[in-house]
Image (cartoon, grey):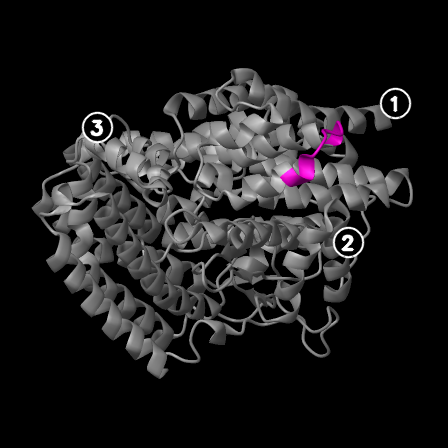
């Protein structure tokens, strides 16, 4: 069981220093976490912690060493008790984690999260035997039990994913040791988070956090963008030893665990948790890398001409177009845009999204110490998801809102599967979010006032897709190189810098020059620390949705119902089963070309506008 999955930052941060005085964006919502607990001292919190300690102990007493003796009903009862434990632990850790991410610099909140993690790790250590003993059951025996009991057979996907680890399983004693040791790895993640949150940057006389400084890279004024990039490089350079230490330690820990488990590659554990075959990921990676010249290289050459530059610098990558008007989208307008797009696809989707805006399920404003980026956290299946944003009214912030609400819709629909089956592998977890973005983008494109506005929207979407597909595969290649190199010994900051630069020119293309200091920009990417090799899921999700949207755009009969069924399935089906009703197969190399061709089509349209 995994009591709390740390929320991952899903979008490139797009923040700036909050404006003082009257808020021009309207009333930005804040979380109401009382649906989980009313406070850290709430009697319900103590009640649940006490219950959890007792439930874990009695579970171990009742079942350790006895799984092989259980009949079908007995094994079902065992699974249901494990599911209830996951639900209660998940509620506690969701509350502690979300409260922490509201203000990561608050020592009391950090302590509360850490204390909860330690308690739940201690409580759940006796449960480690469950997956180990389950994997010692004979295939025929487990198959026969599921054939006897349909309710038990529902959990076949859970058993399948657990048993995928069977070849890499260690002794019971070592597995318990690794379970206990997990809190040490969590501490390195918190060191990264707190270091990032505490960085200060001086740009044009203002003191900013990392979010505000990164956001300046999207400003219209080129001098401002350059100043921000140079300041990022300076501060990263000053703190690079800390970031290198975190990455060295995390990568070494992973190498040790992988070696003891006999994992064939550093990526294998991620593929197993994603329920995806290594060859499917390699097909995706190869298709994207082969498409670099047709996608990013071609688009950035167009952008270089639009910006009137001889050479692109890294601070020009996310620059707005010269014809782009800087405008703020108020919160009410953003809500209307996303609600309209979602409801136009299917009114049921609008009904699912509405409570997020009205019931305190979104925390939107930029606040000191708040976690950067954006995420949707599902909490537990008897509660509801929460969405975190850092909303500053840029059109891309609207797309981020659409993205995270897509996750929210997915999580609400999948909740019916229960705690063990609702969670979707990362490769499919981006489906509803990217699809929601596409719906919102198409709505905005359809209402564009003129060719100039259409061009700006198309260019913005292409950039987002390049950031989601090309940039994330480049990130994946960087991680592959980093973990491979770490197996040969300690890496200096210069070693890691060199690995970063080895993938940047290849992915961005010949239109770019790279300033001194850009080699340190790997330092702020949280995915590398929180969830190694997570990043390919973005490219997987974008390619999948592009192919899926093509089916929708072609007017496939019953698409909406099939789409809802896919989301409701959560993690209960493999990607082949989920995509089959749409006539799609991610294991077919041509599948990825279908998705990439949509990006090419947008670039074709942009090039045609130049004629």
Residue at the disc numbered 2: 340
Residue 413 lies, in percent from the top left, at 55, 51
Residue at the disc numbered 1: 611
Q: Secondary structure at mark 3?
A: helix
Q: Earlier in the sequence, mark 3 or mark 1?
A: 3
Residue 126 lies, in percent from the top left, at 15, 57
The crowd level at tag 3 (other Cα within 10 Å; few <14, some 14-19, many 20+) is few
Q: Is residue 557 magenta?
A: yes
Frontmost of labels 2 and 3 is: 3
- Picture quadrant of residue 431: top right
Above or below — where is 46 with respect to 611? below
Q: Which residues are magenta?
A: 553-561
Q: Nearer the viewer, residue 576 or 394?
A: 576
Question: Is there CB contact under 8 Å for labels 3 and 1?
Answer: no
Residue 117 lies, in percent from the top left, at 28, 64
Residue 111 lies, in percent from the top left, at 30, 72
In 3D space, how far apart are the residues under numbered discs 2 and 1 (Cα atoms)? 34 Å
The crowd level at tag 2 (other Cα within 10 Å; few <14, some 14-19, many 20+) is some
């Amino acid at each position: 069981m995994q009591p709390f999955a740390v929320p991952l930052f899903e979008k490139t941060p797009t923040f700036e220093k909050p404006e003082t005085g009257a808020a021009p964006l309207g009333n930005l919502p804040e979380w109401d976490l009382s649906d989980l607990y009313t406070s850290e001292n709430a009697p319900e919190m103590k009640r649940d912690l006490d219950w959890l300690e007792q439930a874990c102990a009695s579970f171990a007493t009742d079942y350790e060493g006895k799984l092989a003796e259980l009949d079908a009903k007995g094994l079902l009862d065992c699974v249901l008790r494990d599911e209830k434990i996951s639900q209660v632990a998940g509620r506690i850790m969701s509350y502690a984690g979300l409260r922490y991410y509201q203000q990561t610099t608050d020592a009391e909140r950090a302590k509360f999260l850490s204390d909860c993690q330690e308690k739940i790790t201690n409580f759940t250590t006796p449960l480690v035997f469950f997956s180990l003993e389950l994997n010692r059951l004979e295939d025929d025996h487990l198959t026969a039990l599921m054939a006897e009991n349909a309710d038990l057979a529902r959990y076949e996907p859970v058993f399948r994913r657990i048993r995928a680890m069977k070849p890499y399983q260690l002794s019971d004693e070592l597995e318990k040791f690794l379970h206990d040791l997990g809190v040490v790895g969590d501490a390195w993640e918190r060191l990264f988070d707190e270091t990032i949150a505490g960085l200060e940057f001086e740009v044009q006389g203002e003191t900013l956090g990392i979010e505000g400084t990164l956001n300046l890279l999207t400003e219209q004024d080129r001098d401002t963008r350059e100043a921000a990039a140079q300041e990022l490089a300076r501060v990263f350079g000053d703190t690079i030893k800390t970031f290198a230490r975190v990455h060295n330690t995390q990568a070494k820990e992973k190498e040790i665990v992988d070696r003891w488990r006999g994992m064939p590659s550093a990526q294998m554990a991620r593929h197993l948790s994603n329920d995806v075959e290594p060859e499917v990921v390699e097909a995706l990676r190869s298709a994207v890398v082969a498409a670099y010249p047709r996608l990013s290289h071609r688009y950035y050459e167009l952008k270089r001409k639009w910006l009137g530059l001889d050479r692109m610098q890294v601070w020009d990558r996310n620059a707005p177009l010269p014809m782009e008007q800087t405008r703020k989208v108020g919160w009410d307008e953003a809500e209307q845009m996303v609600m309209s797009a979602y409801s136009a696809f299917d009114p049921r989707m609008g009904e699912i999204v509405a409570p997020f805006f009205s019931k305190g399920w979104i925390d939107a404003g930029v606040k000191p110490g708040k976690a950067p980026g954006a995420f949707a956290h599902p909490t537990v299946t008897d509660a509801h998801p929460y969405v975190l944003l850092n909303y500053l009214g840029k059109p891309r912030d609207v797309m981020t809102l659409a993205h995270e609400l897509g996750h929210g819709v997915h999580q609400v629909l999948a909740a019916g599967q229960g705690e063990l089956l609702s969670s979707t592998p990362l490769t499919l977890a981006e489906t509803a979010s990217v699809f929601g973005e596409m719906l919102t983008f198409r709505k905005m494109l359809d209402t564009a006032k003129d060719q100039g506005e259409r061009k700006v929207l198309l260019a913005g979407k292409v950039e987002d897709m390049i950031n989601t597909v090309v940039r994330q595969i480049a990130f994946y290649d960087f991680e592959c190189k980093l973990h491979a190199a770490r197996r040969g010994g300690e890496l200096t900051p210069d070693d890691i810098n060199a690995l970063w630069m080895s993938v940047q020119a290849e992915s961005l293309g010949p239109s770019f020059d790279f300033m001194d200091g850009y080699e340190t920009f790997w330092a702020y990417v949280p995915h590398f620390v929180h969830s190694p090799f997570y990043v390919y899921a973005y490219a997987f999700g974008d390619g999948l949705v592009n192919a899926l949207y093509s089916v929708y755009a072609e007017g496939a009969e019953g698409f909406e119902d099939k789409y809802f069924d896919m989301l409701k399935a959560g993690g209960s089906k493999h990607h082949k089963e989920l995509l089959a009703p749409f006539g799609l197969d991610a294991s077919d190399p041509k599948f990825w070309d279908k998705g990439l061709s949509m990006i090419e089509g947008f670039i074709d349209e942009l090039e045609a506008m130049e004629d």
